[in-house]
Image (spheres, rainbow, N blue to C red):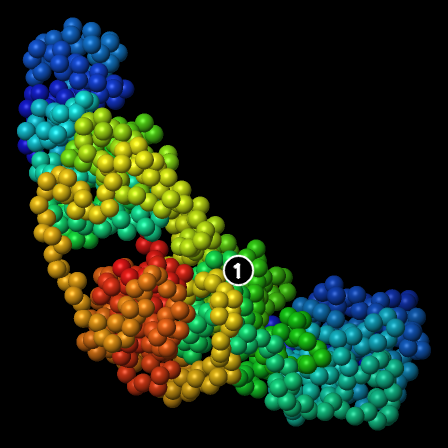
Amino acid sequence: MKTLTSADRTALALQCVEELANRKKQSLLDALKDVGKPLLEKAVVTKTLGEENAAKFFKAYESLDDYVAKLDALGIDCVSIYSDAYPQRLLDIDDSPIMLFAKGNIALLKTDMIAVVGTRRPTRYGIKVAEEFTREFAHAGLTVASGLARGLDGVAHRACVQQGAPTVAVLACGLDICYPPEHASLLEGILSSGGLVISEYMLGAKPLQYHFPERNRIISGLSRAVLIPEAARKSGSLITARLAIEQGKDVFVVPGNIFSPESEGSNALLREMPHALAIMPEDVLDCLHISHDSSPAEDKSVELDIFETQIVDALHDGEKHFEDLIAATGMTVSALNNVLINLQLKGVVDDIGGNFYALA
Amino acid sequence: MLAKLKSYALDGLNGYAVDVELDVNSGVPGYELVGLASTATKESKERVRSAIKNSGYNYPAKRITINLAPADTKKEGPFFDVAIAVGMLIATGQLESNLYKQFVFIGELSLDGKLRSVHGIMPLLISAMQRGEKRFIIPAVNASEASFIAGIEVYAMDTLRDVIDFLSGVVYQPVEISDFKSKCVEHGYGVDFSDVKGQTVAKRALEIAVAGGHNALMIGPPGAGKTMLAKCVPTIMPQMSFEEAIEVTKIHSVAGILDSSIGIVTTRPFRTPHHTTTVPALVGGGNKATPGEVSLAHGGVLFLDEMPEYTRHALETLRQPLEDRKVTVARVLRTVEYPANFMLIASMNPCPCGNYGSKENVCTCTPQQIHHYVNKLSGPLMDRIDLQIEVDNITYEELRGGGETESSEQIKKRVDAARAIQRERYKGLDILTNAEMNAKEMDKYCQIDADSERLLEKAFEKLGLSARGTTRILKVARTIADLEGSENIKSTHIAEAIQYRGIDRKYHL
């Protein structure tokens, strides 16, 4: 690990005073004449932070090496607001975190990012939207950032990991904790596929409720734009959207089912700002002036045999139940099972549950 | 005077000989029954006294000592009433005949002198027969149960009076042997797969399950007809052989759930213990070590509706019987072994509220709840379940007025053919069906070609199958191949088998 500069050390010691709000920390850093030598300006520190917190700060400053060793052991880097690795976009926002802890590929911080955030309880539709958009973004060279939360955040990360694209996860807790715990393997996947996990919280910090909106400002702050595939009325992704607008970022919203409560939030957002409408990944990419090969022919041209074609034809006018497919094609149950599995493996057909099938 | 009669008592599924010895002497009137008798056995005192008096005989006002030998085995149940009553009449000189020495007496008495039915007649008679006993006197109610045992002479009596008359020389006819086949025709299942409209996928999957002896799990919303489907499963299982029927009847007889008017179990059992069931009720136990649901389902189907609702402890205890096909119930004084070779059919909702993945209704469960719900089924238990079947609640008869549906009879023919192939293949081995194959046998009989190998690999990658699912897929594919009469497993068989791993595919949340 690179040695910390004196300014980094001050920022890190300051970050150790967990009771302090980020803005307060910033104001101290601004007040110091020489950020690298806070001990020479004890009066300023005490005046800005108050006596109790100043004492904590000095204590942390003195025992900093222990903490750094601990971070080192976990393979965690410190990226302070003074560091070269600190992304410009995050500096530009109003409340830039003075310190980021990072694990993984730090270089990603300087790449073009887009945030994909959404409901924790996605519908099938929302999952599909998130996957499709994420894949296209990654394909166009954008780094997808999200919050590793349950639901669509996880879907977005997973979509990246599956195609080996790097992705950035911003946590609302210390980097030694995985929240939600069921995403432990996903977290590993993110790291092993060249991704990055960051957080502004100290080791051992729990995912407290107020951390989440704070975390969201980092997600939107890092990104050029925010995409919301699906959001319920009280979704945290709406906070991210609001923060993103305040930070002057573009927000894109994919319209949802008007009957589904899981889409109420995103649809309401669209009514407020119709220009945020995105109905395909290209809408977003064009708006960000990112070049993309106009839908590359990929391996879309899969070869289908006569039975498979029959099924695909039958599914053209919408999803069908297994029994309908039997009626439409006259196949036996086992033959149809067979064809359907092959079509699923070819990625042409999806099993959407309840013995219903649809074109992918 | 002294009298000694033969009787039998139950120990698990076997009977053991009990000698009933009576000594009636002059002295202070009294009654002593020795030989580790349980309460039900001890209380014979009052039943016998009233029965004797009400049948018109005299109960002696003397010193009566009764010994149930062997003295160190605990005697359960009211099997000895008749033997004691008859012995009493001999010891007091009210019956003067030596005919009784040829008979084994089994039966309970009611106060008016009638012979009441006892549990376990079939196993008692079989055990006694194996020990060389030839002639029996049993309650008339148990006659039909005894009528399936050839080679013995059974006299079924209504009252104590009849018994005494018979022993005094009045001629009675022994129980006639019944025909098992005709009983089977007479008493069928009452349900049929042709009653289930739609559900083609589920029916096909259950056909495969039965053909290969696989356990199956049905996943679907409430009201989808999972129970109805499960009830039909025994109808496509191979016809019970007489030997199997006897084995099942023994268990049911001991448990006291045998229909005494038929006397033998003619249909494969279908047991549905409620999810609040206790462990002893499920695997057997209690202080009498009675058979549990797993044994009552022997030869048939054990259906666990709403499987995740069962206590984890109850589910885990199923592992031994699923593995060994028998259960050993250990109690302080004895250990009893019951057969438990059943087909497990379980059902579950897709999530606690039942609407996960539904088209019409919104699921109100959080991912954690669903995760927790599905996770209640432990890996080792899921490893014993080869097929996962998705059942939906689309009512197809409403949509198209119900088309042709196959009857159980037609499906059974295919199942029988597939079973015959397996019997042939596993000749000389200790197994009968594909589900029972171990790793070595799978290596030998589940060879797949390169095509199938590729398919499997792709399925892992694309559909998120778990590694432990491979074995299940191969076994099921073997059965599908057998149903088709194909010697080798082809990729089409593998493909279909993959369709039946619904949980693996959809619940990697």
> Which residue is rendered at x = 13% and y = 25% of the image?
A92
Q: Is residue A120 above or below residue B483?
A: above
Looking at the image, can residue B153 be seen? yes
Q: Is residue B243 above or below residue A261?
A: below
For this view, does A49 lie left or right of residue B192? left
For this view, does B316 lie left or right of residue A40? right
Quick one: A200 or A130, which is closer to the camera?
A130
> Which residue is rendered at x = 29% and y = 49% of the image?
A127
> Which residue is rendered at x = 80% and y = 87% of the image?
B100
Instruction: Name the residue beneath numbered marker 1.
Output: B223
Where disc 1 sits, the SS reads loop
For this view, does B392 lie left or right of residue A23? right
> Which residue is rendered at x = 12% and y = 8% of the image?
A41
Number of marks: 1
Quick one: B42 or B154, which is closer to the camera?
B154
The x and y percentages for residue A194 are: 13, 46
Looking at the image, can residue A148 be seen? no
For this view, does B363 lie left or right of residue B477? right
Q: Is residue A73 above or below residue B508?
A: above
The x and y percentages for residue B406 are: 49, 79
The x and y percentages for residue B403 are: 49, 76
Chain for mark 1?
A: B
Quick one: A158 or A29, which is closer to the camera?
A158
Q: Quadrant where the N terminus of chain B lies?
A: bottom right
The kind of residue tagged 1 is: Gly
The x and y percentages for residue B372 are: 41, 49
The residue carrying pointer 1 sits among few (fewer than 14), some (14 to 19) or many (20 or more) residues within 10 Å by Cα, namely some
Quick one: A87 or B260, which is closer to the camera?
A87
Quarter residue B503 falls in: bottom left
